[in-house]
Image (tube, rainbow, N blue to C red):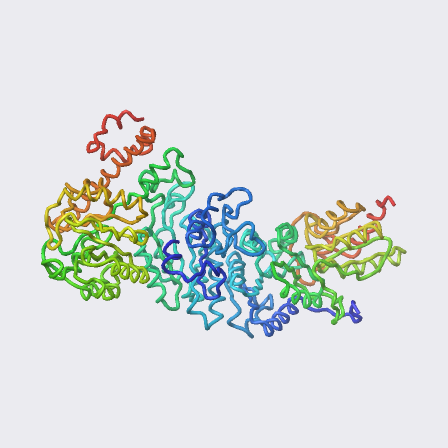
Amino acid sequence: MLLSSEKKTADMRSAYGDTLVELGRDDPRIVCVGGDTTDSLKTKKFGDKYPDRMFNVGIAEANLVSVAAGLSIAGKIAFASTYAAFIPGRCVDQIRNAICYPSLNVKLVVSHAGLTVGPDGASHQQIEDIASMRTIPNMRVIVPADAVAVKHLIRTIARTPGPFYLRLARPSSEVIYADNAQSFLIGRGNVLEEGSDATIIACGLMVVRAIEAAMELKRKGVSCRVVDMFSIKPIDSELVVKCAKETGAIATAEEHNILGGLGGAVSEVTAETYPVPVKRVGVRDTFGESARDEEIDTLLEMYGLTATEIAKAVLEARSRNRK
Amino acid sequence: MGTLYFRTMKHDPSNPTWEDRDYFINSKAHSAPGFYSTLAVAGYFPPEEIRTLRKLGSHLQGHPVRYSEHQKHHSVPGVEYSGGSEGIGLSVGIGIALAKKLDREKAKMNKVYVLIGDGESNEGQIWEASMAAGKFKLDNLVAILDRNRIQQDGFTEDIMPLDPTKDKWAAFNWQVFEVDGHKVEQIVDALYKAARVHDKPVMIVANTIKGNGIRHMANNPQWHGKAPPKRQTEVLLEELESECLIAPSIIAGERENYEDKIRKVEREGVDMIHLDVMDGRFVPNTTFFADTIKKLRPSTSLPFDAHLMIEKPLEQIQEYIDARCDIITVHAEACTENEFKEIQERLINAGISPGIAINPGTDMPKWLYRSLHDLDVIIVMSVNPGFAGQKFMPEVLPKMMAVNKELMEHGFRGYIEADGGIDATTLHQAYDAGARIFVAGAAVYGGGDIHGSVIQLRHKAAVALEKRLLNHSTRLNVRSDWMKARKHILIPYANELGIEEELHAIK
């Protein structure tokens, strides 16, 4: 069973922290580097359990990711974690030169990506990271949709050699996947709903909104396929082309700038291989703003990151379908 | 890098990923040509490949790339770190040092050496790393700062001042040592001390001169990223090969304690200390033996150039090895070929340079031609040994010249050392005959003005060098170009070289 049958929420960061502790128990090569945000990232649990394998370098992200590079040169599997505003925000150069160029075994797992950071505002709302990380050779970019996916994907990237960027959101989010779901392969998307009239390809917190949009459209008689494209690079090109061929229109949804993110990656595949109308839902190349936790839904509404907006995008893409 | 790879670091070119190796991180990766050359000489890849440097398809990229299966077409074994963007390597070194500490059994066995630049130290990340290494008390991490005071736009202290450099690192909880980065013995000494520091990372501030060895390029920002004209290459190489070393002999002058004598010349920047060991049998006089050298050893990091004027040197050689001499020279008259071969082998195994000395009346023994490849010094005596303060014998000059020419042809790549009666009036004769190490006894300690004497000897050596290079440039038809490039260097010597008018005419 792929999808969860009960409705519940869970915190992605805790899923990360707990999984890291389990990994650390089984493999002494697992180490973690933090930057004064270990409590928030939930990597503190790992540090409490394995104090000599946890390195807190303070607020110094360039140093943080480079130390992780050194640890991996000496044979460790290095997890480097802080907020997405700072990794990659403050150290793209180090990630490019010290980690990706030599293709080191470093896992950048970051949190507070996208607009849902909340009160901190635009300075901390990282909406360019998928674009910047996706264009560096050797880097792979993963955006899990819920805590279950996080658990599985953290394990997957730990055992897959080479650099990864895995992005988490701050809020507790609705659990989509069944606990025992096993289908998280790098380079593969998951089809969560079947449909024939259009496809929604989403990642992260937008996956649950994509499912809602599909239900909304179903009531209007539009049969909509929903894909969780957690593996943005390498992207599941085969699946994207299949959806293009079988459904003829695509909407993408991501908590990221519409430039260069998931929508960009999907458009690249369709444009080169099987052109169909693609409509991108995301932050429309603008900075965000502060919102209290209870106002997050309103914030997302203001910036067009809702199920309703996705549904509109699907209809628009369909209307442009010349088939 | 030479000191690290050939004296200090544990590494194995035939097994570059050897688990017990020390790590070298070249953070100032634009020094790639020097780094690649070191790796090639050490045996990590064939030296011929150096010619492909920075060309399309080369293993030798502009900035070295960490060697792996993944990058094997663009790298060579032995490169641990991909550099290029400044300021990152020290952090990477911290990561490796932390990992090695985790494998606690081996903590004492793996050291991490990181070379950083002073321009590079403008990067904030250097100071992030500095704080972190202090926090983690990484005593298996040794950073070396190439303090050449020049960066791309000019002098570091104009672009972004780094001084007080030592205080900064000390304030960040590092153990700081300062050395002359051109003196191998000082680097060796600092690395030796670094290995004995506990609970702190070590910073070795190596004061260097960019372009050292070529006087008109040295310390001149204009040459930071520029190659010299091809036509002058041979003259430049000649200069690099023409280093002159001054080695005061401490038995000369007033009878006073040897430590004081060493301290006085060390202040004047001499290159090594010449130790005349006389046993009263091979020569009529008696001076001191290995036990005295052993006592003097801690007083300086200058190399000890021990000249053993003793009978049966093979029987006593171990004592002088144990006294930590750097060069040990024995007399051709005092041993057979087999004895010398054994001495030579034992010295090389102990990391000591072997030398052989010949008296004015002795010809170079024929058997020596079979040992030339592993010979570092030949002392051609220009007095009969036994006493200090004798007069230079010009009749040895033809022999010195012949020795120089013949031995070079037979593969000798070491130094000819002139010993006996060398002073400001005779140095240039020995220089022209091929000597490059000058033992100066009375000329340094005899007159009471040690400072002035050393300056005068250096000056005479410089005149001899400039004359040689000028002659070479004439032979290569680049004399006026050479004089133009060299003008500001030549001015103080113009009179002695007889080129005042010629130099004046050059714009």
* Front residue of B279 and B403: B403
A8 on left or right of B102: right
Image: B314 above or below B449: below
Q: Is residue B61 left or right of residue A291?
A: left
Where residue A138 appears, x then y in whole percent? 62, 54
- Count the marks: how many? 0
* Residue A118 is at least partly visible in this image: no
**For the C terminus of chain B, which image quadrant?**
top left
Task: Name the spot of residue B470 as percent of width and height, x first.
Answer: 28, 33
Rendering coords of residue B504 (x, y %): 26, 26
- Residue A216 visible (yes or no): yes
Quarter-of-image position of residue B202: bottom left
In this view, the residue farthest toward the right is A221
| On-image quarter of the N terminus of chain B | bottom left
Quadrant in which residue B112 is drawn: bottom left
Q: In this view, does A44 lie to the left or right of B257?
A: right
Residue drawn 44% across the image and 46% down it: B33
In the image: residue A110, left or right of residue A312: left
Q: Residue at x 33, y 59 (%)?
A: B188
Q: Where is residue A282 drawn, in percent x and y?
A: 72, 52
